[in-house]
Image (spheres, helix red, strand yellow):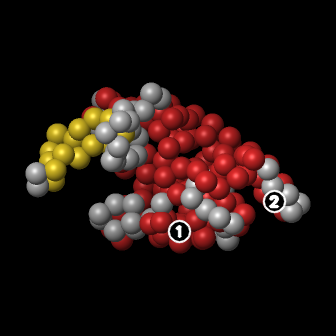
Amino acid sequence: MTVKEKKTRFSSLIVPAVNNVYSNLMKRYEEIKKTTDAGQSNDVIEKLKAEYKVTTNSELLMALKPHPKSIAIAQAAMESSWATSRFFREANNVFGVWSFDEDEPRIAALKKRGDKTIWVKKYNTVEEAVYDYYRTLARSAAFTKFRQTKMTTNDPFILVTKLDRYSEKGSVYVEELTSIIKFNKFDDYDKK
């Protein structure tokens, strides 16, 4: 398979799922924002606050606002080796999301860390993996600055600088993400 064929296949598998999830998340964000801006609350908002581990409306809106599609697509490309990794093929795990819950569907990595087995979540569909990825970034304390920044800008090149904790590579990961977005013009998806 050529690089072009690999990227075309990747796009056909990932982009529709990201577009759909982003659209649904943005719709929910706008509905919740409208309600909270009107000074109102409801059971849905209270349940979402519990799910996203937040107490205030502003924290909830930070969690619910989806980040640009370009970032999700670039991370999917990196983490799944353009939809060719074993985690992707066997578990629809597009983003390399680890599992710490032995009761959830998951698969073991082939290599151990010392004497520890690394597990990654197993998803039924790519779309389910994309939803979980957005939820992970919306809930984890590691991405608080990322969530705060996305409330003031949608610029993917500014936002990716706040994702250095997504990978053990740190700032190198940010540089690689930036490069993938630029080279593949993934920021064009943010304009659609």
State the count of labels: 2
How crowded pointer 1 is (Cα within 10 Å; few <14, some 14-19, many 20+) is rated as some
Q: Amino acid at mark 1?
A: Thr
Q: Which mark is residue 36?
A: 2
Q: Earlier in the sequence, mark 1 or mark 2?
A: 2
Residue 68 visible: no
Which residue lies most toward the right here?
Answer: 38
Mark 1 secondary-structure assignment: helix
How crowded pointer 2 is (Cα within 10 Å; few <14, some 14-19, many 20+) is rated as some
Mark 2 secondary-structure assignment: helix
Q: Amino acid at mark 2?
A: Thr
Would you say the residues marked 1 and 2 are in contact, meaning their CB atoms lie under 8 Å apart?
no
Residue in view at x 39 percent, y 60 percent: 166
Residue in view at x 47 percent, y 70 percent: 161
162 and 73: which one is in front? 162
What is the x, y in percent for residue 5? 39, 32
Q: Nearer the viewer, mark 1 or mark 2?
A: 2
Q: CA separation, marks 1 and 2?
A: 21 Å
Q: Which mark is residue 5?
A: none
Q: Is residue 174 above or below residue 90?
A: below
Residue underneath mark 1? 144
What is the x, y in percent for residue 82? 37, 40
